[in-house]
Amino acid sequence: HAPAPAPTARHVRADVLKRFWDLASEREEARIDACEGLVRDLSRASDGDGDGGGGADAKDARDSARASGRDDGNDDGNDGCDDAVTYALRRLTRGLSSGRGGARQGFALALSELARGATAKLTPGQALEALDANVAPITKSTKGSEIRDIFLGRLFGAGAVARALQGGGGGSDEERARCGGDVARRARAVAMEKMHLAEPAAACVIELKSSLGVELFGTVVEREPSIREWLSADCSEKGGAETVWLACELYDALPNSVREKITCVPMTTKKTSGKKAAKAGARGDGVDWSEMFTRTHLKKISNALLEASYTHPRMHSAWEMLIREASGAGGTITLWEVTCEEGLFVSGSHQRRFLGFRVFDALLNCAEVNEIPGLFSDNFVKCLLNNLSQPDNYLHECALDCLARIIKFASNKKTSADKKIAVIAALQRQGPTRFDQITKTNAVQDLVKSLDESEVAQYLDSLFEIVTAAPQRDTDVVGTAEELESALANGAGQRRRLWALEQMAGLTSMLSKDKQVQLVQFMMYHAFYRVKNGSKKGKSALPGHLRSSTLEEPAGAVRAACATRALAMLNANIRALRASSNKDASTGGKKSDVPDLLDETTLFCRALESDANIEMCDAIPSEYAEVRSDLFNALDACEKSKSEVSHKVMPLIRVLAVLQVTDWREYTPALQDLPRCINELIAKKLKKKKDDDAPEAIDVLTDILLSLLAQPSALLRDVVEHTFKAVSGQVSKEGIQDMLRIVAGPEVGEGAEGDDDGDDDDDNDDVLMEADDSDMDDDEDEDEDDEDDEDDDEDDFGEANEAEIAAMRAAASKVMGTAGDSDSNSDSDGGMDDAAMFRIDKLLGEAFKSRQQDLRLKKNLKRATRDFKFRVISLLELYAKAQPGSPYLPGAVVTLLDATRDALGKQDPQSVQLAQRISSLINKNISHARDLPDSGDDEVTADDLQEKLKSVIVATNRGAGEGQVFNNAAGAAAAYLLRVLEAVAIHEQGGKPPAAGEEVASAQATECFREGLKMFKSKGSKLKSGFFARMFARHPALAAALLPELFGLVS
């Protein structure tokens, strides 16, 4: 007999059919109600309560089919179910592949309830058979979107059956295990086919474990090889995140034989014993999360976690699991460093960096106070700032959202004060207002204002304890004693101490005056001082908060960090004091709230050095200690003196006293003459005797200031510039000439390259003379000379290398002995064996390496020289602003113009930058000086100014490489000298400045520009008509005096 036809919609009541439409609703409540109603309807139909179909005709048709034997009882894999249940099962399994609304969720829910036994005649096994019968197969003609829907239908169906096995559903344990194995196998097949479905497939297996229980699921794992293969897969390949997630979530149910093959989870060393072991089936405990979050293990699975960014913009479940467990296992910082700081944020992938921001937000909400600084790591902050500052960046909105979440966390009332302070300090690590400037908000400042001083002080005390305490050894590190010590000095505990120091620096603006002093004393003491071994108890110069503060080893990196942070604090404090004093002056002299940390630090250092129980970590020798004593005596004299200059140089003395502690070898030689010249300045011994050849005190001070500019300390350079500005009114002509000599002088390697080669001195001198003489030629000759110089340098390098090779060969022959001792079968190498050849190669390699080091050293020295010139130019800018009536400026402008021309002639980018800086000095500072210089020891005369103006016109006529830069500087210099010349000429004649429209050009100016017009006529002149137009526009009387020459040009 033919099988009975499958029941259709006309065999089912209309109210039952409506349940299927409600199951596809997007509202979860509607789907749940529809599922409950469908189960009730099908239960009544299965129990014979009602016809369950479409009326009497349907019931008669079923009876007739059974009587005729056409109903074989095997429709759609559902043996024995009546028509309503059969129709529902077929429609539910087919509807799992539908993407309409919430169809998958609703149909999977209903299928799970039916397979659970809600109807008496359906089991999970029959539901799986219905899935095979009703879900459409994939063929070559199946479209891509249809393939996706089919795989999703299979996955939702497997998940529904897995949930149906809960609470003992599915029959006996054997039947449940067999059905569970089928579900796991189907989930693994889907994961293998589609990478983007691997995570929900793994979730299906985890749901299966929850339904079956630990014991029965372990049986499934032992029987099903596909699950064992999945768990032991290589995490470095794609899909590794699902393997990590599965292994961790299923670990407590896995037999030890399976655990041993898993590489993504460390083998648990703890074992269950006694009755529990027998009950657990020889299984160990769950995942040892403390071992899971070691750096060694996280590096094994880091690549798998990085690849999990394919779930963008959602976070993979493996990440959520690790973040959830990290806090309790103390692995927050290790997880962040290995996977994010060294992984996600060093990648060029936008998806990975987006994931990094999301991981940061999740970890910040569960991090402890001491872990928050570690989350604000360098690569994260750099990425955050870059994307915040660039609105066009792909991750700009994500960065804004991340910053908003940070501010929300810190401003939340439920966030403790310690965590709030830690976040604020981390945000201020890049600068007190950096984040506010980028985001154009006052969010960080508002957070700072909301803090209580007592809360900040309490947090600072806790940071003191972190810095001084010894770091804990990492149990994950093994090796020799030296390797263990190195790991301890560079491990997470040591980094935590450095983070605490950064936090302290960020708290400065939130601390009271007393706490700021305590902080800088803490850093200075632990950076440069210590208690002597075997010191006697008694009165100590140490403040109370430092007497019990002993810096535990390893302390090298901590001392260096303390020194850096202390100097940075002093630099910021000095600037804050200046800003506060300027503000006080404009608001009526209100007393500043900013403490003088530099003064407090100097007093603190003097007190420690006077204590017999305290010593410096790097003790100063006795001969240098005398210089330090003289420096302190000069400071005392300045404090007692009422002279104006004494108070101006006191910050310099204090800074040098502090810096001498940091590196007495570098700073002490520069300080030897400073106390003497300061004492002379205070005593107003500015004039030297006629028979005294000693330099004046102000000249010595200027030389010292110039020498200190070469130091790398930003604190020192800042104080030097302000000290020079304060004493600029007393700077002599010799001091200005020294500064000009530095700016216009040659760089390292120019004119002295051959000093090391002995006989090559004459050749280099000839090259220098040629370069100097070429200045009188045209630009073409100058370019040819430069090319020749470069060729000579290359030849020198080649000759030097050949000489070194010859020397190495001679040394090799000495090492090997005479070549004549070899036998008659020796080859062209002179009888040297392989060992000898290797030794020669080693010597040659060292020779080339030495040569390259020399070249690198010369390059660094050249860069340092140019930087030094920039710093001296800054002093000249300060001098021109502070002393606009200086009689030395007219002479300085000529020298600076020549220096601009020389720098442009070198035709390299760095020299062009130097020329632009000098040109800016002339245009923006010197050219705006007063018309009539002050009368001093060096009186400016009209004849001198005439020669200077003429030299500027001649230089302009010759031109330079970068014409625009030089012409701007030359035009500004000529206009300034012309203005000064006219004022001085009138002053020498004893007259008063003429009224507007009555000016008369001086004879000196007229003569200079008459010569300039003659140069302008020549064919090779570089003078431009704009040069003269600029002068005549500002001095119409000069144009009137030169009318004959101008008419001659026109004719």
Image (cartoon, rainbow, N blue to C red):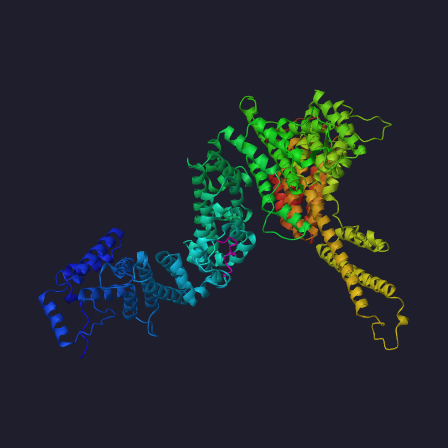
Q: Residue 263 in magenta? A: yes
Q: Position of residue 758 (x, y in %)?
A: 86, 54
* Depicted 335 relative to depicted 934: above or below: below
Residue 841 picture quarter: bottom right
Q: Quadrant of the N terminus?
A: bottom left
Residue at the image point whose x is 50% and y is 37% from the top: 424
Residue sitting nearer the eye, 189 or 417: 189
Q: Position of residue 950 (x, y in %)?
A: 72, 42
Residue sitting nearer the eye, 187 or 583: 187
Residue 728 seen from this side:
no
* Depicted 764 relative to depicted 1004: above or below: below
Question: Is residue 477 found left or right of 270 in the rendered image?
Answer: right
Question: Is residue 146 found left or right of 509 in the rendered image?
Answer: left
Q: Residue 792 in magenta? A: no
Q: Position of residue 383 (x, y in %)?
A: 51, 49
Q: Residue furthest front?
A: 274
Q: Residue furthest bottom?
A: 1
Residue span colored magenta:
262-272
Q: Position of residue 334 (x, y in %)?
A: 53, 49
* Depicted 252 relative to depicted 875: above or below: below
